[in-house]
Image: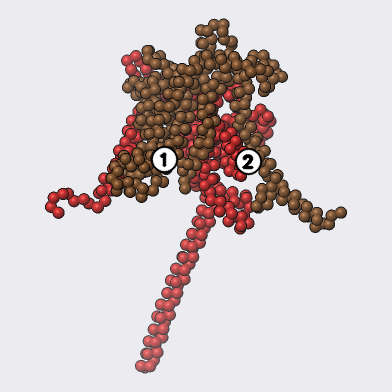
Amino acid sequence: MKNGRKTKPGQLERRENAIGYLFILPWLIGILVLVLWPMVQSFGYSLNKIRLLPQGMAKLYVGFENYSQIFLKDPDFIMGLESYLLETLIAVPVIVAFSLIIAMLLNQKISCRGIFRMIFFLPIIIASGPVMQQLADQEAASIPMMNVTMIEQLLDEYLPHVLAVSITSVFSNMITLLWYSGVQILIFLAALQKIDTSLYEAAKMDGGSKWECFWKITLPTVKPMILLNVVYTVIFMSNNEQNALIVLIYDTMLSATGGYGYASAMAWLYSVIESAIVIFFAVLIMGRKDVYERRARKYQRELKREKRLEKKIRKRGERNERNYAKQKAKQQRKGANKKSA
Amino acid sequence: MLSPEGREQIKYKARKFIFGSKDTEGVGKLAAVYLLLISIGFVYLYPVLYMISKSFMNLNDLLDTSINWIPSQMYLENYKQAFQSMDYWKTFRDSVVIAGIPTLINVVICAIVGYGFARYDFKGKKLCIGLLLFSFILPPQATMMPTYVFYTDIGLINSIKAFIVPAILGQGLKSQIFILIFFNFFRQIPKVLIEAAKIDGAGHFKIFRRIALPSAAPAILVVFLFSIVWYWNESYLTQLYVVGAFTSNAGGYHWSSLIVSLKNFENSYNTARSVAGSGMVDINESIEMAGTMLSILPLLIMYLVLQKQFVESVDRTGITGE
């Protein structure tokens, strides 16, 4: 062909896929302008002392002084961080386990299922910061029949004090924790309904009990959802308005002594710690092998070992054959020599 | 007298009746399940019931220790006063606008972006999805201060524009989740369908509008519902960006939202009281509960109407995979 450019193979497809950029363009701009750039800027802020003047911001570069000040001179933040860490590490497993149990209860064939579901999903709608605050002020966020002080005394005897206090706080904020698990129940329920019932039937035929069915069918199937729920819960709890640290950052930002720079340093520290928690849980869950993965791994190992053994035997056989052939040849030569002699 | 076998038989039958066999559920087990569900359900409902009961009590009922749950009369004065101090109608209208407009934009933009991710295989797609997940995990506090300064500079602060602009750029409230929902949903559309449309001469946007979007109705519904609920309940960012409790708003429209006004209920009630004079009583729990009730009432009504859509929503979006 003389006129007209050549189209290389795959070029058309590539050109078409470039349209994808057009579709995600708004988001691309958004993440650059509203996420990545402010993040960098925020880090820049955290290295400065910033004062707001009528003319604008007055920056003073101080290096990492803000960070060291947080650790050395700010008991509020450190204490808040401690209780936040403990609370999250205890509350997240509780919430996820609870929502899995409730989802399994709701997944059974029972009457009035619709009404129960309606009750359990209600918190998704109404559990917002100020509402929870109002309820907590009225002491309506703890179960009235539960004797928390007794539990605390009991735990205090066996556990270190810090741990006992945080476990007690789980009990005393039981309703709050339950209320935070609406979305998680929804996700688990959807996952449970997707499990093929023939799996359970097959297990039943083989004589598996309900207990075994849970560990060997239900849990491996919903494992990705557990990870999703854990991540969601950590993020929800960390960015929630009930969280004391969030309030502290907010107050510092607008206070005279703190200012933008100091608050930015706090926010950065907080983000790093939150990400660390998310990664910690993700590794914990994904690192844990279920029955099948363990079995498959064991099988693979055995297969490898067998192969190695086979190879060994084959090699030995070959060697023996070679030696045998050599010996035979020697003998023949000897025989020939004898004959000739 | 029963023979030992007969006794065994009865024992076996009783056990079967209570614990159930492999085929049928036993009565005892069923009762345990119901008991558990009802008690947990009660715990769930307890704060709401408490709120409703307290909000109807007058001062005498509050002080009377013999009255725990049921007020002596339907006392509506609490609601009247909370209504007045919150400036309910205006606040309600503002709330609807603050939650509604960003939600609509969210639905449109997230659908477009989700479709872009699902349908096209462009360079750097993996990186983009990684960034999407990263921005989901990142707490908003990390970017809050520069964003606040930025919005102030370009004049978005103290108006609903501070919610609209991020929504247009796909960075609205929890937009990342919604993009992922659409991404998951559009991936399930058979490629054959799109290729057939292409052969018939449809362009990229036409395919999106005429084929992808109509089939995504369940995802649209879910995103719409959750987005409106989350925007409605967001008090932190609303107060910072839209209501603007800190910088005085010279002229212009003063926005407010029900959740934010609930947050500052005590203050605003006291101011309203000092203005109104003798008409209003001192603030007490009942009035606070009435205020709380009023601020969640619109969502509660919406939930009761659309309850089924909420409950079945996650099923339909395919978050849980096929």
Question: Residue under circle 2?
Answer: A111
Of the numbered discs in the image, which one, if any, rests on residue B216?
1
Q: Residues within 10 Å of mark 2 (few under 14, many from 20)?
A: few
- Coloring applied to the structure: by chain
User: Quarter-wise, where is residue A86 in the image?
Assistant: top right
**Three-letter amino acid code at the position of disc 2:** Ser
- Which chain is painted in brown? B
The residue drawn where x is 51% and y is 53% is A293
Between B225 and B263, the one lying in front of the other is B225
Most extreme residue toward the top, as rendered? B278
State if disc 2 and disc 1 touch (CB < 8 Å): no
- Residue B20 higher or lower than A58, as above or below: below
The residue drawn where x is 51% and y is 35% is B310
Describe the element under mark 1 as helix, strand or loop: loop
User: Quarter-wise, where is residue A55 in the image?
Assistant: top left
- Which chain is painted in red? A
Viewport quadrant of the N terminus of chain B: bottom right
- Residue B156 higher or lower than A5, as above or below: above
The residue drawn where x is 33% and y is 30% is A33
- The picture places residue A13, in percent across and down from the top left corner, at 28, 48
Q: Residues within 10 Å of mark 1 (few under 14, many from 20)?
A: some
Give the left or right position of residue A124, taking residue B131 as reference: right
Instruction: Please state the chain letter of the residue tagged with numbered disc 2 in the rendered image.
Output: A
**Three-letter amino acid code at the position of disc 1:** Ala
Can the viewer see residue A105 in this picture? yes
Between B228 and A286, the one lying in front of the other is B228
Between B18 and B131, the one lying in front of the other is B18
Most extreme residue toward the front, as rendered? B200
Residue at mark 1 to residue at mark 2: CA–CA distance = 32 Å
Of the numbered discs in the image, which one, if any, rests on residue B243?
none
- The picture places residue B171, in percent across and down from the top left corner, at 38, 32
